[in-house]
Structure formats: structure tokens, C-alpha cells
């Protein structure tokens, strides 16, 4: 298995952490500086449905309270014979370890010393490089409110295509860090992975931005509880609360507000019109609150957002070759084609405090993505553009958390990413196989006239059904100086593709001599359609153990993850087409079948003992992410039912503009 090793060394003053949730930790001493074991430490906040979490300091006076949600906390320290010490106003972001120390003075328990001070801003125990964006920051940034559009603002993260003002909110860009490709990113909601399956997990779903209380981006030093070494993104969801609250967000950007860089030089070079933005909007409403106070909370949100973009070199013509030619000669006389897109999201989340020590949460985010006219330069707007629909498109998860004791935490969860979508002909263009209309409805492309196309090319018409499932579980044993965690994670999935098109070929022309598209036949590009293609990810299994060990001012973060990946091409059949016989293939197993270790190690040192400056070092090995691959890798590369084509000459001797001929002619 391919792997990557990263080394990080530096003095950091940014919040960093290795967990999906946050931690409060510290040391308790008496007035003489002696450590105090047996102190009861309680962290309370309105963001906790159970209200309070408590632990006891160990023999060296250290404590850790893990799995805390982001919010404002009060930390209370009590021990018989000493005054109660209370620290107010601790603002705890996600993915952060806040150091809160206490010095107790001799006195009665009913005597309380309350201290309100600065919130810790430096994580002196973990080695992960984390940047957390709060809800206020997410609302203030002028982005497209996508995980990629926000991620490009984080130090160390780049996009393959920049998202300017939300212009890429409909068609994804891909994040990367350390030069790794996007398949090595991990996308999570509340610590549960919701990566897609397509292209080894590069293609992600769309997310309802209003569901997030905070978003955490991690770029280095990631622990053994995560497989890949790219960007680790965790969306911390809103859960509702004991009071009803809601929000409404709206934005509108009109094309008339956009600057114009369509210069005369571009026109002189033959560009008939330019790509631009016609309209971008985003409307998002949410509401949350109690169903049963302190027991059952709900949160729901609905969103619709859209990007309409005129595409360079496209026109809305009268549908005839001469009409398209007229648009090429006088672009200003024809309306430009617009790639119209919108996404709707409806999300619901429930959080249930089953008992004082057990909590269950679940959510479902249903996506409806519509793209009315997907096209490129030269495509005829009415006939060659592609219609996108999403019959089943969602992410979902369910999570159980059990605080067995103040030292033992058990978590388990299930998550799913379904991205079932279709790329279709415009209404009325798809024809019944073998009919006269089916032969006449072939794709047409003129190779001389800016690749002008009538009826979508075969490569653009398909159905894609990548389904990915994930289960994971872990147990954390926490003492004052140790935070030990063991767990396992398994993902599996199925990817189905189909392709069935008119005529099983593309008619190609070279009409430069006439200037009118589709008037000089040249060749045909014949395909092996129809076919049904499938790949299976049998398992991507990771078993791991890790420990965070604090020794005075030094914290050691060490772990080992062992991973097993297996995928296959199942037995497949596809019917005969115009240029191919019926096909039947046996299974192709073990593509790939890998097993590799991934050790992780890091050191964090509180340089001056003040909790304000930390020096950190990490050395980690990450195995390359793999699902079912793509055309160049993994199971899909070895699938015998891949697309295939070859070119034949065609002169249209009978001048009916229909390429005749069958298999065997």
C-alpha cells in the first residue's frame, strides 16, 4: 500500500487537538504547591444535555474530562477540607484541549472561590494542527458556504479550482494539503466519517451549512483514530437545546454586479461570448429546541442555494445547423446558454439522553440536486446539454455514547453516504433502442467548428450510484495523566454505473469549408454500449490503539493503526449492443488486497510551564486512501466492462445524415 510520512516541528500558539470533541485537563494543587489526589472536578454547560460531567484527580493531581461539546463551561473543584474553587467562562472550541489548573486553599466546602479569567488559547498537550471556525466566523465570511469554499481560507489547505464568492458551490472543487490528492481527506459529522465512495472518496456530498455549530480543519499530526493523512474535517452539529432558537440566512448576487473582462482582444481571437455568473443565491432557515427538557432535543434546517452561469461558446439557437451557424457569426443576436443549477437540503437531528450515562444522536440530510443544462463551449443548449437529477442523495448517521464511569467512555456509530445521480438527455431526446428514431438520434459533433455538438456525447450520459457505509467504535480510558483509546473502523460500499445512448455512436463532421455545422460527414466513433458496470469495496478496516501521556510539562502522543483493504469486481453481465455482443464476466477479486501498519508519534512540551507556549513534534505514517478506485486505479481499473470505442470512416453515401451499419457488417 502506498504511504506518506509527515514530520512537523514548531512552536505553535494555535488551538490543536486529536479528538473529534474537546477536552478540559489540568493539575490541582494546594497552597503549598503539593498535588492533590481525589479532587472532584466538574465541568458544566448548557450545551451538555446531561448538564454536568465529572472526574477525579489521580495520584499526581492530574485530571482529564473528554468528549465535551464546544461551548462555555464552568469548572468546579471540590475536596473535603478545602474551599470550593470555581472557574467561570471557559470558552471551549471544538477539537481543543483547554488547560485549567487550580490551587485549593484550606477551608470549608461551603466557601467558594470563583475566578473568571482568560480562556486558554494554546493547546499544550496535543500535536495536531487544528483550525476551528466558529458559527460567528462562518456567518461573517463571504464564501459559498461549502466545506471546500470555507476550507480554502484555512492555512495549509489549497483547492484545485478556487471558489470565488460561491461560484463553485454547485460543482465541487477539491481540497488538499501537503501535496496529497483529495482522496486522502476525511470528512466527518460529529466524529463519524461521511466520505463518498467515488474516485477513492474524493467526491463528497453537499452539506447544509446551518447544521454546523463549528467546523474543525486539521492538516497535520493526526492520530491513529483516523486513517488518511490529508485534510481531516469535522463538522460539529447543532443539537437544539432546552430553549427554542432558530436562524435565517439569505444572500443574493446578481450578474449585473459583476465586472466584465470580455475584451475586444478576446473577441478578435474568435471567442463569441464569455463565461460569467448570472445569479447566485442562498436561503437557509433552521430551528431547534426541546421535545422533552433535559432528555430529548431536536434540530432541523432547510436550505436552497443556486448558481446560474452563462457558458462561453454556447447559444440558444433555433435548433438547426444554419441557426447555430448564424449565432457563431453574430453572437450578440443570440441568447447565451446558461448552466442552471440548484440544490435543496432538508436536515433533521435528534439527541436523546437515554439515561444519565447514555446518549444517542442521529441525523439525516436529504439532498436534491438539479442541473438543467450541463454543457461546454460549442454544445447546443437545447439538445446537447445534459440534465442532472439525484434520485437518492443523502448523508446520515447514528451515534451512541456511554460514560460508563468517570474514567471509561465507550462510543459507537454508523454513517452512510449515498450519491445516486443521473446524467440524462433533455426531455424527448432519448429513444427506444433499435427504432428508427434511435438511429437518427445519434450524437453529432463538428470537429472544425469549436467542437459544436448536437445531442450529448456518449461520455456525458450515464447513471452513477456510489454507496458507502461506515461503522466505528472505540473505548477511551482516561486518568489524570493518560488518555488511552482503542477502537476499530470499517467502511464498505458498492459502485454501480450504467451507460445507454442513442445509436451507440457519435457522428463526426468537418464542416470548416461550409461554415455550417454538421454538413460534411467525416467519421463515426462507435462505442460498446450499453453496459452495466459494478465494483465492490468489501472492507476498509482499521484497528488502532493510542495514548496521550502527560509527564509534567511533556505530553507524549503515540499510537498504532493497522489497516486492511479489499475490493473486487463482482460477476457481471451486459446485453448486446449495436457493435458488441452480449457480455458475461466472472468476478475479479482482490483489486486491491492490502494490509499495512500506520504508526503515529508526537511530542508536545509546555516550554515555560505557563500554558502559553508549546513546542511540538510529530512523525506519522499514513496509508493511501482506496475505495473502488477510478479508471486509473483500484477495482474500476480492472473492470472488463469499461467504456471502449474506435473510429471508422463515414461519408453518408445516401445523404440521409444517419450512419448505417451494424455489428458484423
Image: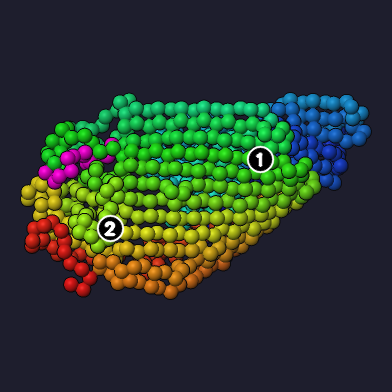
Q: Quadrant of residue 664?
A: bottom left
Look at mark 2 in the image and give the residue it sits on: 432
Identify which residue, 136 or 77, lies in the foreground: 136
Colour basis: rainbow
Q: Nearer the viewer, mark 2 or mark 1?
A: 2
489 is within the stretch colored magenta: no
Query: Is residue 631 visible in the rendered structure shown here?
Result: yes
Q: Position of residue 265 (x, y in %)?
A: 18, 35
Q: Quadrant of residue 161?
A: top left
Vertical placement of 397 versus 337: above or below? below
Q: Position of residue 59 (x, y in %)?
A: 85, 46
Answer left or right for 572 relative to 235.
left
Q: Position of residue 311 (x, y in %)?
A: 27, 39
Label of residue 351 in the image: 1
- Mark 2 nearby-residue class (10 Å; few <14, some 14–19, many ≥20): few
For label 2, the SS is loop
Vertical placement of 476 versus 136: above or below? below
Identify which residue, 307 or 129, lies in the foreground: 307
318 is within the stretch colored magenta: yes
Amino acid at each position: 500500500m502506498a504511504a506518506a510520512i509527515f514530520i512537523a516541528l514548531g512552536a505553535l500558539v494555535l488551538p490543536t487537538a486529536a479528538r473529534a470533541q474537546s477536552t478540559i485537563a489540568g493539575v490541582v494543587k494546594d497552597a503549598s504547591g503539593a498535588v492533590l489526589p481525589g479532587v472532584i472536578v466538574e465541568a458544566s454547560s448548557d450545551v451538555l444535555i446531561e448538564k454536568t460531567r465529572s472526574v477525579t484527580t489521580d495520584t499526581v493531581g492530574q485530571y482529564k474530562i473528554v468528549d465535551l461539546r464546544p461551548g462555555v463551561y464552568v469548572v468546579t473543584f471540590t475536596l473535603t477540607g478545602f474551599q470550593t474553587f470555581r472557574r467561570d467562562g471557559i470558552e471551549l472550541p471544538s477539537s481543543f484541549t483547554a488547560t485549567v489548573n487550580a490551587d485549593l486553599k484550606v477551608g470549608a466546602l461551603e466557601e467558594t472561590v470563583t475566578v473568571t479569567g482568560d480562556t486558554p488559547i494554546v493547546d499544550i498537550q496535543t500535536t495536531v494542527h487544528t483550525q476551528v471556525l466558529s458559527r460567528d466566523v462562518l456567518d461573517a465570511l463571504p464564501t459559498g458556504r461549502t466545506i471546500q469554499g470555507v476550507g480554502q481560507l484555512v492555512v495549509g489547505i489549497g483547492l484545485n479550482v478556487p471558489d470565488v464568492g460561491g461560484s463553485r458551490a454547485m460543482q465541487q472543487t477539491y481540497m488538499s494539503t501537503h501535496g496529497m490528492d483529495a482522496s486522502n481527506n476525511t470528512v466527518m459529522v460529529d466524529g463519524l466519517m461521511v466520505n463518498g465512495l467515488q474516485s477513492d472518496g474524493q467526491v463528497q456530498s453537499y452539506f447544509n451549512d446551518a447544521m454546523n455549530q463549528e467546523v474543525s480543519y486539521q492538516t497535520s499530526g493526526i492520530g491513529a483514530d483516523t486513517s488518511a493523512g490529508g485534510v481531516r474535517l469535522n463538522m460539529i452539529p447543532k443539537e437544539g437545546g432546552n430553549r427554542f432558537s432558530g436562524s435565517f440566512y439569505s444572500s443574493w448576487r446578481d450578474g449585473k454586479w459583476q465586472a466584465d473582462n470580455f475584451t475586444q482582444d478576446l473577441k478578435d481571437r474568435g471567442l463569441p461570448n464569455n463565461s460569467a455568473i448570472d445569479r447566485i443565491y442562498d436561503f437557509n432557515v433552521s430551528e431547534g429546541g426541546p421535545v422533552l427538557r433535559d432528555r430529548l432535543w431536536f434540530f432541523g434546517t432547510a436550505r436552497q442555494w443556486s448558481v446560474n452561469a452563462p457558458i462561453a461558446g454556447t447559444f440558444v439557437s433555433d435548433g438547426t445547423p444554419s441557426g447555430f451557424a448564424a449565432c457563431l457569426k453574430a453572437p450578440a443576436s443570440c441568447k447565451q446558454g446558461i448552466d442552471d443549477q440548484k440544490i435543496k437540503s432538508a436536515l433533521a437531528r435528534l439527541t436523546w439522553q437515554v439515561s444519565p450515562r447514555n446518549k444517542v444522536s442521529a441525523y439525516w440530510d436529504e439532498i436534491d440536486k438539479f442541473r438543467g443544462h450541463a454543457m461546454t463551449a460549442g454544445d447546443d443548449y437545447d439538445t446537447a446539454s445534459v440534465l442532472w437529477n439525484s434520485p437518492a442523495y443523502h448523508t446520515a448517521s447514528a451515534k451512541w455514547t456511554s460514560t460508563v464511569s468517570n474514567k471509561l467512555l465507550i462510543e459507537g456509530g454508523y454513517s452512510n453516504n449515498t450519491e445516486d445521480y443521473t446524467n440524462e438527455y433533455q426531455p424527448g431526446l432519448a429513444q427506444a433502442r433499435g427504432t428508427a428514431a434511435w438511429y437518427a438520434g445519434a450524437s453529432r459533433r463538428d470537429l472544425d467548428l469549436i467542437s459544436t455538438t448536437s445531442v450529448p456525447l456518449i461520455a456525458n450520459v450515464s447513471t452513477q450510484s456510489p454507496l458507502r457505509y461506515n461503522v466505528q467504535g472505540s473505548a477511551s480510558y482516561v486518568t489524570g495523566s493518560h488518555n488511552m483509546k482503542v477502537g476499530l473502523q470499517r467502511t464498505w460500499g458498492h459502485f454501480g454505473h450504467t451507460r445507454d445512448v442513442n445509436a451507440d455512436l457519435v457522428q463526426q463532421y468537418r464542416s470548416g469549408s461550409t461554415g455550417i455545422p454538421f454538413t460534411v460527414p467525416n467519421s463515426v466513433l462507435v462505442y460498446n454500449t450499453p453496459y452495466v458496470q459494478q465494483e465492490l469495496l468489501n472492507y476498509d478496516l482499521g484497528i488502532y490503539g493510542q495514548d496521550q501521556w502527560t509527564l509534567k510539562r511533556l505530553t507524549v502522543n503515540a499510537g498504532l493503526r493497522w489497516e486492511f483493504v479489499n475490493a473486487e469486481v463482482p460477476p457481471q453481465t451486459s446485453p448486446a449492443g449495436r457493435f458488441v455482443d452480449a457480455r458475461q464476466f466472472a468476478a475479479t477479486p482482490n483489486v486491491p488486497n492490502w494490509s499495512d501498519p500506520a504508526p503515529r508519534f508526537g511530542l508536545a512540551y509546555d516550554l515555560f510551564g505557563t500554558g502559553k507556549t508549546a513546542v511540538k513534534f510529530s512523525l506519522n505514517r499514513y496509508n493511501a486512501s482506496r475505495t473502488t478506485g477510478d479508471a486509473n486505479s483500484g477495482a474500476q481499473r480492472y473492470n472488463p466492462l469499461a467504456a471502449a470505442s474506435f473510429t471508422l470512416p463515414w461519408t453518408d453515401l445516401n445523404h440521409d445524415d444517419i450512419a448505417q451499419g451494424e455489428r458484423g457488417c
